[in-house]
Amino acid sequence: MIASGFHIPLRDASVDGTVCVRLTHHLPTEAEREQLVRELLRVSRRFLIMSFFDYDSPKNTLRRLSRPFNRKPPKLTMKVGELQRLAQDCGARLVGSPALSLIGSGHRYALMVKDKV
């Protein structure tokens, strides 16, 4: 099957869970990142495991502070609070969002769980 992550050709809650790793930080707009998370939660009956680049990470904070002195484009990020809101909007809860590394990476994993099975 070839499909878009924005329009997964599955019924609501048709799979136990979904996993999406190292994709969201490549999506150019906040709306697209949000749409992807909503679609993954739509097809998931129980859980979503995903990674995201954390806006508030030390690595991203340093990148934002050094921005006037370099030409690196800003990272495409998400905030933990944003994921909590998305999870709640979709009938799930954000159980945890551990950092991949405290200083070496701005990436985090998120586990969202739907309590009603």
Image (spheres, rainbow, N blue to C red):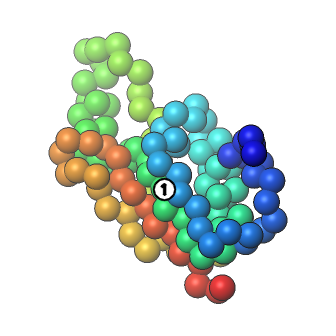
User: Quadrant of the rendered structure where residue 46 is?
Assistant: bottom right
Nearest to the observer: residue 25 or residue 14: 14
- As shown in the figure, which amino acid type bears the numbered disc 1? Met
Q: Position of residue 21 (x, y in %)?
A: 47, 48
User: Quadrant of the rendered structure where residue 58 is?
Assistant: top left
Q: Position of residue 69 (x, y in %)?
A: 25, 15
Residue 6 as seen in the image, left or right of residue 68: right
Quadrant holding the N terminus:
top right
Residue at left offset 20%, top offset 51% = 102
Residue 37 as seen in the image, left or right of residue 79: right
Residue 33 as seen in the image, left or right of residue 112: right
Q: Which residue is mark 1?
A: 50
**Is residue 39 positioned above or below 91 on the image?**
above
Give the crowd class for mark 1: few <14, some 14-19, many >=20 residues within 10 Å: many
Q: Position of residue 52 (x, y in %)?
A: 44, 48
**Is residue 83 positioned above or below 104 on the image?**
below
Residue at left offset 28%, top offset 52% = 100
Q: Position of residue 82 (x, y in %)?
A: 51, 57
**Is residue 55 positioned above or below 49 on the image?**
above
